[in-house]
Amino acid sequence: MRLKEFITLSVIIFILFFSKILLGQAFDNSYPTKKIEYFPNSINSFWKYERHDKIKDEIDTVTIKIIGDTLILNRLFRIWEYKSKNSKEFYFYSTDKDSIRIINPISMDLIQLFIIPFELNRSWVVYEDVNILSHNNSVFSVMEIKTNKTQEPESELFLIKHQKYGRNVYFTEIIWFKPYQGILRLEKKHWGRVQSIDESWELIESNVK
């Protein structure tokens, strides 16, 4: 074998050897991957819903995206952006080991509190005004759970009822929630002096990080 041919063959073997190493690293599944949260609350996650306003008989879309985070009294909150054709709203979500808190960033009022993980027949009450307990509180209850026993726990689907009572105000919300994916469907009704709401939301697209 000539010296030139030997050098060429050696270079080829060298390239093939290191290419195998690099490809092996690229497809190595042993590298740790980020685990999706039970109640998704990671930046860049998004959900897109078709919203049906039953009072106006109108259909539009709402896109919800987690765009960043902020600190409030040393508590980390994710910033959720709710964007539709004619409006844009923001809410703050905070994840604890056993709960999810949702607050209005303008008034800083607690809007919702979810106790997780969800369990059948579990219920809890959120008091918004300690002076008027019977007239101003939110009641949450897990009404139903459907599980396909042949699949992983992620196949669980919870039906959660949220009712809010106030002076001349009644609010009810039914939430279909799938762990690790988020809210699949939402039915919302609100009767009050100023505004009435009767809406249904259906998930049409999502990307959970």
Image (cartoon, rainbow, N blue to C red):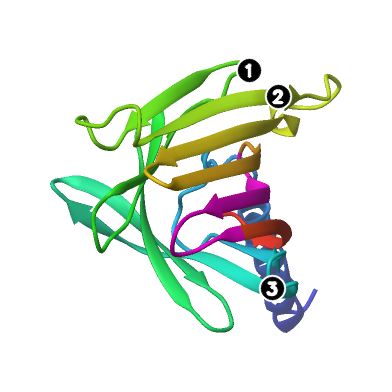
Q: Is residue 6 above or below residue 186?
A: below
Three-letter amino acid code of the residue under disc 1: Leu
Residue annotated with mark 3? 56
Image position, residue 209 (x, y; %): 55, 54
Q: How far apart are marks 2 and 3 (CA)?
A: 30 Å
Under circle 1, the secondary element is loop
For label 3, the crowd category at 10 Å Cα-Cα, with few meaning under 14, some 14 to 19 and many 20 or more, is few
Which residue is farthest left?
A: 73
Give the structural element (helix, strand or loop) at label 3.
loop
| Count of numbered tags | 3
Amino acid type at mark 2? Glu
x then y, percent, for residue 67: 41, 67
Label 2 crowd (10 A; few <14 / some 14-19 / many >=20): some
Identify the disc placed on residue 74.
Answer: none
Label 2 vs 1, first from the N-terminus? 1
Q: Name the residue under label 1.
A: 120
Left or right of residue 153: residue 37: left
Residue visible at 46% across and 39% down?
164
* Of the pair 150 and 133, the residue shown nearer to us: 133
1 or 3: mark nearer the eye: 3
Q: Decide whether the magenta segment is chiefly helix, strand or loop.
A: strand
Residues shaded magenta: 180-197
Amino acid carrying label 3: it is Lys
Alpha carbon distance from label 1 to label 3: 35 Å
In which quadrant is the N terminus drawn? bottom right
Q: Name the residue under label 2.
A: 144
Q: Which residue lies furthest to the right in this view?
A: 150
